[in-house]
């Protein structure tokens, strides 16, 4: 009878260990690199401000060496993102991560109507270009299959491009923000996997940039730093 009880306890103990081991991923640590685009950010925000302060006119068609059509302003160009993420799987359902991102936060161009210069170019332009980086930590839950969702905090840095000709130095701003992300990883238990990540960064408030113009001197713009990224790439599990 005593030997039967010992055997039963041994079975329960080993069964419990097996259940715990089943909930732990075979490869917990992973590193992934992704690239993609940026939506929003200071260039997009500043474009709206350009219109309100008189830099959203329509440039007329003109000719000098070649002819150009009329164009509406402001004009914007989307940014780009390159991300590196380290993730640790606590269980098959929960994970934590840390990462860093290099950002091209987009460009914006404004136009104010006015007389042509010596080369026949009408009016005046202002050219805005922003870049930066972010570093974050996050926690993740995996509700089903390859899908995961996460929230975390991030430290952001954004700066404009200096203009030595106009005597304008680079202006850099740092802000703390909150992030939310949704990701899909295909190749759940394989060593190499493919990843698609949509991540939104909310950065409270706005920052001030001083930008040079050719004829009207420097202008002051208030721009928001919140943005979103959609990136894809591959990773490896350790």
Image: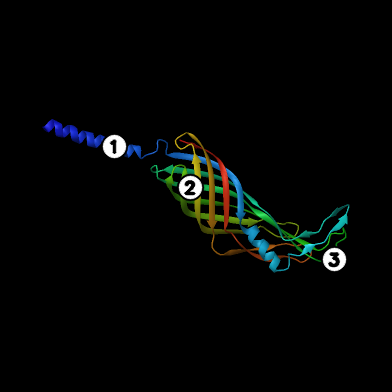
**Residue at 61% from the left image edge and 57% from the top image edge:** 41
Asked whether, in this view, residue 152 is left or right of residue 68, the answer is: left
Residue drawn 70% across and 69% down? 53
Q: CA distance from mark 3 to mark 1?
A: 81 Å
Q: Residue furthest top?
A: 3
**Residue 82 image offset from top left, x and y in percent:** 59, 45
Observer-nearest residue: 104 or 211? 104
Residue furthest to the bottom: 53
Q: Earlier in the sequence, mark 3 or mark 2?
A: 2
Q: Is residue 173 left or right of residue 122?
A: left
Instruction: Look at 57% across and 48% down and name the residue there.
Output: 230
Q: Which mark is residue 98?
A: 2
**Place of residue 29 in the rendered image (x, y in percent of width and height, measured from the top left):** 44, 39
Question: Could you tell me which residue is drawn at 66 percent across and 65 percent down?
Answer: 221
Q: Where does residue 84 sit, x and y in percent of width and height? A: 54, 44
Quarter of the N terminus within the rendering = top left
Viewer-nearest of discs 3 and 1: 1
In the picture, measured across the screen, residue 184 lies left or right of residue 73, that is left
């Amino acid at each position: 009878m005593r030997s039967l009880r010992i055997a039963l306890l041994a079975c329960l103990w080993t069964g419990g260990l097996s259940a715990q081991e089943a909930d732990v991923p075979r490869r917990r640590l992973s590193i992934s690199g992704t690239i993609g685009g940026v939506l929003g950010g200071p260039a997009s925000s500043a474009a709206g401000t350009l219109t309100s302060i008189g830099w959203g006119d329509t440039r007329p068609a003109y000719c000098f060496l070649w002819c150009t059509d009329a164009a509406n302003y402001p004009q914007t160009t989307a940014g780009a993102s390159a991300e590196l993420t380290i993730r640790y799987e606590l269980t098959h359902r929960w994970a934590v991560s840390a990462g860093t991102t290099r950002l091209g936060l987009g460009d914006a161009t404004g136009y104010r109507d006015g007389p042509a210069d010596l080369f026949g170019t009408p009016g005046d332009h202002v050219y805005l270009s922003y870049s930066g980086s972010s570093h974050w930590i996050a926690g993740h839950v995996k509700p089903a299959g390859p899908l995961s969702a996460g929230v975390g905090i991030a430290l952001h840095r954004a700066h404009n491009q200096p203009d030595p000709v106009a005597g304008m130095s680079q202006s850099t701003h740092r802000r703390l923000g909150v992030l939310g992300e949704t990701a899909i990883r295909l190749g759940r238990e394989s060593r190499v996997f493919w990843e698609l990540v949509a991540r939104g960064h909310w950065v409270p408030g706005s920052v001030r940039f001083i930008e040079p113009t050719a004829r009207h001197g420097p202008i002051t713009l208030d721009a928001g730093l919140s943005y979103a990224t959609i990136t894809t790439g591959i990773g490896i599990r350790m």
